Image: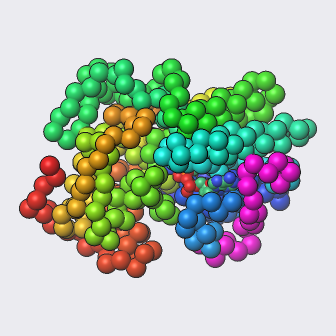
Amino acid sequence: MTATDAPSAPALTGRRPVLVTGGAGFIGCNVAERLARSGHDVLIYDALARAGVERNLAWLKEKHPTKISVVIGDIRDEASVAAAAGEAAAVFHFAAQVAVTTSLVDPKDDFTVNVAGTIALLEALRRRDNPAPLLFASTNKVYGDLADIPLEATNDAYLPRDGELRVHGINEERPLDFHTPYGCSKGAADQYVLDYARSFGVPTVVMRMSCIYGPRQMGTEDQGWVAHFLIRALEGSPITIYGDGRQVRDILNVSDAVDAYLAAWRRIAVVQGRAFNLGGGPENAVSLRQLLRHVEDLIGRPLQLVFDEWRAGDQRYYVTDTRRVRQALALPRPVTWRKGVAELATWLAQERGLPEITGGRRPAEALP
Ligand SMILES: NC(=O)c1ccc[n+]([C@@H]2O[C@H](COP(=O)([O-])OP(=O)(O)OC[C@H]3O[C@@H](n4cnc5c(N)ncnc54)[C@H](O)[C@@H]3O)[C@@H](O)[C@H]2O)c1
């Protein structure tokens, strides 16, 4: 992508800040950085609930000391959320309980953060005379485990038997089917966000995202698997694969996700009230096994893999049909996954003081 075709942030809107909830987190801080770089004042609202995200805040404040303000607060705190959203020119809503695993341990906490927190924000906007746009980070998990899609297994990956699906991926016509508490809470929030456009005229957009990866991702076993695998590989620690490793995802570089969010804001008059599937698309579809091979290539030594049972709600195959989002938001071609993953490996090694990636050789031992 060149500088000229990169979607930029919308025109400056006076001194009204742009609110980024979860702005210390992975996607939120990348959005905040791009906004600040484009000259916007950015208000970050985050509870610092995720380990390590304070490093993202420090990075943002160092890069843009006059553009970034921060409220440390919980998205369920209605008064505090209303104060933050009261003057916002736009709201990017990323604050969430983000992991399926944790939602199974504490479904009520997951519900209150993801549903009640989102409603607190929507209500704050509804009360305004002229509600600001809200852009919401939803998930492909709203489509459930997709177990009805007939698949075939190759040595490396699951693939749909249906030719159309194989070529294009899953589009927005797919029926909603919430699985796991996380799927339910994100799905409910997704539907409230769309309904506040329908019932109250709040200009909202929903992005149902596949796996996003890239710099400033504090990946763990619970969420952020691309960064998690790389961190474990760089440290020389074992990696647990839940299932057989043939599960396929279309991964999207965070810079491309940021482009999509900013384009949605810029085109809000046209796209309000709509939900889009956002991911790397068929050209960035990769199985866990294929990604791990690439990681082996990058670091030049075999990985230690441990296989365990499938996890609840895990889709065997999810690839985004990106035609609608790319057309509606005039998005450029995304970063190719091999290049993006190599860049993330380099960034993680530098950030954690681990040995530099030199581009290794193919190890003798292959994955099973
Ligand atoms: N990363 C992905 O691949 C992906 C895929 C689909 C959807 N999403 C959604 O995108 C959003 C951002 O995800 P991310 O990967 O950047 O995760 P992240 O964990 O890095 O960011 C989430 C942020 O929300 C904050 N937060 C958590 N609970 C909070 C609370 N109660 N009040 C205020 N702040 C709170 C955390 O401290 C964190 O900074 C989430 O809504 C997530 O569900 C992410």
Residue 227 visible (yes or no): yes
Is residue 86 found inside the magenta-colored segment of the image?
no
Q: Measured from the top left, where is residue 63 in percent x and y?
A: 62, 73
Image position of 18 with respect to 138: above or below: below
Q: How many badges with numbers are in the image? A: 0
Above or below: residue 43 compared with residue 169? below
Residue 58: horizontal and vertical position, in percent? Answer: 62, 73
**Residue 70 lies in magenta, yes or no?**
yes
In this rendered view, identify the residue nearer to me: 112 or 355: 112
Q: Which residue is drawn at 73% across and 55% down?
A: 74
Q: In this view, does 55 lie to the left or right of 280?
A: right
Question: Where residue 225 appears, x then y in whole percent?
Answer: 40, 53
Residue 137 location, quadrant: top right
The colour style of the image is rainbow
The picture quadrant where one finds residue 156 is top left
Residue 47, position as x, y percentages in the image? 69, 60
Quadrant in the picture for residue 240: bottom left
Which residue is pictured at 13% across the width and 55% down the height? 366
* Magenta residues, start to end: 59-82
As displayed, is residue 277 above or below residue 262? Answer: above
Query: Which residue is outermost to the right?
Result: 129
Q: Check the image and name the residue furthest to the front.
A: 105
**Residue drawn where x is 81% and y is 28% of the image:** 200
Q: Which of 62 and 234 is in front in this view?
A: 234
Q: In this view, does 20 lie to the left or right of 208?
A: right
Residue 135 visible in rendering: no
Q: Which residue is drawn at 13% across and 63% down?
A: 363
214 and 94: which is toward the camera: 94
